[in-house]
């Protein structure tokens, strides 16, 4: 038994104050500003000990939070603890007192209620719902997250599972969480404990799987904003059933496999020649460019340029390709005989200056000319001429867009994926690019076109890459003006 007096006694506040002072001494002794002085074994050992202390503190917070919830029972009305402090819910009071998030406060209450002693309505003691979890929590062997994962899943199985089977599952999960199950001495993380708990739940309550699947099906959702953020992004989100999510993961994994990472190679011409053609190997703009090695070689040529997009950006670009592919599919319902149409409104002055903003019908924010340019590059354009009052003066003819036969020809010529080397976006989800711009007299002909995914098409339209036709096939190179920039090396 501990030599310390109970904190519930008159000296409880003094005791806790002393413990907090000792915690400060511990922090000083650990010298967290100079952890680099520790060898690896000592670092991990001390981290484990500190985690044990933190888990012990979480156990106390969970029990205290459950007590706050008891004293804030709605039946007490305005005499409830939370109500006295002008809060509607006990979790709000816990959140303010502890400084944790709303989700963490609710988790503390739930875990505390399931691992602490209870009283019946008549005031008689009741057994703890999850005694094994409670004991491991109080000993600092598991944290609140692992306790939450175990108690949540077994609670779902409890209505249709035998009590003895629930006890076996609880003991097994706690054993795995503390390192006494799957591999002796190696505990499972809170996330893996959650995976195991779900397996136990489904095994204990096989009749509950179908109702949960139906409930998940009914909760599927997708939303998309009609307005853009100040940064020019349209937010969307939602949730799908596990089978749809699995298909989406498989698609992303296939297209974004590490072995298919793009490499952007510089052009084959003499890299020692400067941008201004003087052949000095340097650029006069010293703020952004860097001098080439004395041997006249370009490091970017040897190393190639790695795709620097984040994983999230790559997934967003795959999603853009999926939208393009579906929009062009013959199975999509048509509107007045045409595929789903995006209507862009832009003035003749913006088109002439190639700068400024336009409007996409349905989005309540202006869009940059670079976005409009990319849309127009692979679109049927029907010019509508308006007078200053907004009345239609004249309607032009359909022009510019590559047809289906031309797209098939480009796929046969360049392959089934984006024309950028090593990009695995399927060509059916790519946009058609005019190598010589249509506005500059470039024809809508297969010899003047190539299929690029949304991302690489944007990089071409913004001048990062240039495309030329060599022996009847498109060749992509890094633009001269950017080839020597340090961040592209």
Image: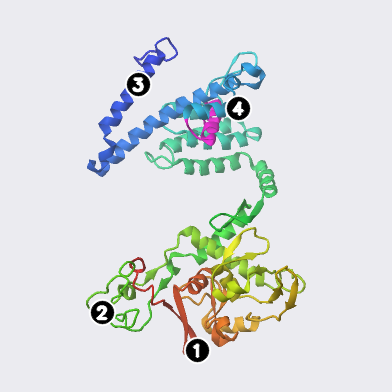
- Residue under label 1: 472
Q: Residue at x 35, y 65 (%)?
A: 487
- Residue 97 horizontal/vertical position (percent): 49, 26
Q: Which residue is mark 4?
A: 89
In this view, 237 is above or below 328: above
Is residue 173 inside the magenta stretch? no
SS at circle 1: loop
| Mark 3 crowdedness (10 Å alpha carbons): few <14, some 14-19, many ≥20 | few
Camera-near label (2 vs 3) is 2
> What colouring style does the render use?
rainbow
Q: Residue at x 54, y 24 (%)?
A: 66
Foreground mark, 2 or 4, reads 2
Q: Does residue 353 lie above or below 308 as drawn? A: below
Q: Could you tell me residue 39's position as x and y percent?
A: 23, 43
Lower position in the chain sequence, tag 1 or tag 3: 3
Displayed quadrant of residue 296: bottom left
**In the rendered image, which residue does mark 2 sit on?**
296
């Amino acid at each position: 038994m501990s030599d310390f007096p109970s904190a519930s006694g008159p000296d409880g506040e003094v005791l806790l104050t002393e413990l907090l002072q000792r915690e400060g001494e511990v922090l000083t002794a650990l010298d967290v500003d100079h952890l680099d002085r520790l060898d690896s074994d000592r670092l991990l050992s001390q981290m484990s000990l500190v985690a044990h202390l933190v888990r012990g503190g979480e156990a106390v917070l969970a029990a205290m939070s459950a007590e706050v919830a008891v004293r804030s029972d709605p039946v007490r009305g305005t005499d409830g603890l939370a109500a006295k402090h002008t809060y509607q819910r006990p979790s709000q009071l816990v959140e303010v007192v502890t400084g944790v998030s709303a989700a963490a406060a609710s988790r503390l209450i739930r875990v505390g209620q399931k691992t602490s002693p209870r009283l019946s309505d008549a005031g008689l003691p009741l057994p703890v719902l999850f005694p094994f979890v409670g004991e491991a929590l109080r000993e600092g062997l598991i944290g609140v997250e692992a306790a939450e994962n175990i108690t949540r899943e077994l609670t779902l199985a409890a209505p249709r599972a035998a009590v003895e089977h629930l006890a076996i599952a609880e003991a097994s999960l706690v054993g795995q969480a503390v390192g006494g199950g799957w591999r002796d001495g190696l505990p499972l993380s809170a996330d893996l404990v959650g995976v195991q708990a779900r397996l136990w739940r489904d095994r204990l309550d096989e009749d509950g799987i179908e109702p949960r699947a139906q409930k998940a099906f009914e909760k599927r959702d997708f939303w998309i904003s009609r307005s853009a953020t100040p940064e020019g992004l349209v937010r969307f989100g939602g949730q799908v059933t596990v089978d749809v999510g699995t298909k989406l993961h498989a698609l992303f994994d296939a297209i974004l496999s590490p072995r298919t990472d793009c490499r952007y190679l510089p052009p084959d011409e003499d890299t020692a020649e400067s941008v201004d053609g003087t052949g000095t190997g340097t650029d006069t703009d010293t703020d952004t460019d860097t001098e080439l090695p004395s041997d006249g070689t370009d490091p970017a040529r040897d190393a190639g340029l790695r795709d620097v997009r984040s994983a999230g950006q790559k997934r967003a670009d795959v999603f853009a390709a999926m939208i393009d592919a579906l929009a062009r599919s013959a199975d999509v319902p048509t509107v007045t005989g045409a595929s789903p149409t995006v209507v862009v409104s832009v003035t003749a002055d913006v088109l002439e200056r190639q700068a400024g903003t336009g409007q996409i019908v349905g989005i309540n924010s202006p869009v940059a000319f670079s976005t409009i340019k990319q849309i127009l590059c692979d679109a049927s354009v029907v010019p509508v001429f308006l007078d200053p009052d907004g009345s239609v003066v004249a309607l032009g003819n359909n022009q510019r867009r590559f047809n289906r036969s031309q797209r098939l020809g480009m796929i046969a010529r360049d392959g089934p994926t984006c024309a950028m080397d090593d990009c695995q976006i399927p060509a059916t989800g790519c946009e058609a690019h005019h190598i010589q711009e249509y506005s500059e007299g470039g024809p809508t002909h297969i010899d003047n076109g190539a299929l690029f995914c949304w991302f690489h098409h944007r990089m071409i339209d913004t001048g990062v890459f240039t495309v030329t036709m060599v022996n009847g096939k498109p060749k992509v190179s890094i633009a001269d003006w950017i080839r020597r920039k340090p961040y592209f090396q």
